[in-house]
Image (spheres, helix red, strand yellow):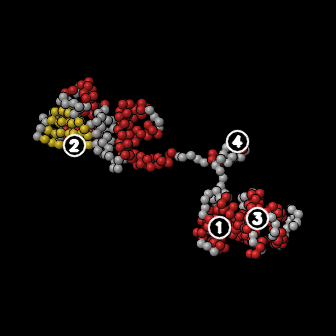
Amino acid sequence: MREAGQLEPFEDLDVLADQYARACDGADRSQRRRLREDFVREALPFAGRLARRYRGRGEPTDDLEQVARLGLVKTVDRFDPERGSFTAYAILTITGEIKRHFRDHTWGVHVPRGQQDRVLEFVHARAALTGELARTPTVAELAERLGVEESEVLRAQTSAAAHSTESLNSPLGDSTSGSEMGDLLGGPDGDLTLVDDRATVETLLCELPARERQLLALRFWGNRSQVEIAEELGISQMHVSRLLSRALTWLREAMLSDTTPPWTGSGGSEHRVLVTTGPDGVHARVHGEIDRDNAHVVRRELLNAGGSCGHGRRLVVDLSGVPLLSAAGIAMLGAVHTVARGRNVTMLVTGVPAYAIRILEISGMRALVDGCTR
């Protein structure tokens, strides 16, 4: 046999295999081991040439040559001279080992074996068409070359992207910076979970009266304090606090319920004065808050009710449905009382909030209250 390290042409392997087979006949175990080592050593250049055919596919050349050499050893151990050419058997065995290495060890994620084979066909066809067309081939052109549907080409293209992956711990740029690939990925965006809530709140805000919308805008968008809001709107800070609390409570209930609850505060469509006429006079039941925004409306309605009483009759104003009676509301009652007295109508106020009794006394209107407070 030839000296180790000599390059052998492809056809010489069959001669070497024939010489190796004849030399092994009648040799003992140690002699066969030496002959085997010599044969493998002289065939190594052939295995190296097969391995170098697969360069540039993402695997180090040294690793490919190592796989090819293992395939050569398997070929030598399994070769039977009676079954044909050693060279043909070696090519099949070594290339099979190299392809198996690509299939089992070079994919970043698991891809079925059949799909891996289609990916290899796709890669080869794309490279060939790129050379022929001098441009990147289209999906239709690849499908025609491979004789498959375009959907198969798209699946192979997607699977090919899984062949080579990078670790999130791969360094970025200068390794001394300490930055890794994973640093480029954003974290969970908590605001995404609030999209539905924001859309719902925007819809509900449109159902609030204009005054409440203005208060909420000044407080939460304008970042104004309650004192500043009170000065701008000409009401007390306590009144601002009540209005904000009521608006927020209604929004919270509306967010948690399937149906929108009715708005019962002042300024909404539910604010009203219900007037009933009896044998002794007129009964006016007021619903909703009374402040400077609607005091003039309530005053007009009460005056209309008082005008229908007639001389010597009574006008009973029921405030039990009024959750808030502001200073403007107190002044409104005084104005209605003055007009009613000029018409010889006795005005009586029932259901007055307890906190308003003292204010009525100071204003000289204690006589309006029948003693029924709440």
Left or right: where 323 falls relative to 305: right
Q: From the top left corner, tell me how far across and down residue 98 is, in percent.
A: 72, 63
Tag 3's secondary structure? Answer: helix
The image position of residue 126, as x and y in percent, is 69, 68
Task: Report which residue position mark 3 lands on.
Answer: 72
- Callout 1 environment at 10 Å: few (<14), some (14 to 19), or many (20+)? some
Decide if residue 303 is in sight here. Answer: no
Q: Give me the residue at 33% from left, 38% from top.
A: 293
**Amino acid type shown at disc 3:** Leu
Q: Residues within 10 Å of mark 4 (few under 14, many from 20)?
A: few
The reply to whether residue 365 is visible in this rendering is yes
The spot of residue 133 in percent (x, y) is: 72, 70
Query: Which part of the image, by quadrant, shows the N terminus?
Result: bottom right
Quick check: 84 above or below 252?
Answer: below
Real-space Cα separation, disc 3 to disc 2, in angstroms: 104 Å
Which one is nearer the viewer's eye here, 336 or 85? 85
Q: Secondary structure at mark 1?
A: helix
Q: Which residue is mark 1?
A: 117
Task: First in sequence, mark 3 or 1: give its number.
Answer: 3
Amino acid type shown at disc 2? Leu
> Gap between marks 4 and 1, in whole Å?
40 Å
Between marks 2 and 4 in the image, the one whose residue lies nearer the viewer: 4
Judged left or right of residue 256, residue 136 is right
Q: Is residue 283 left or right of residue 87?
A: left
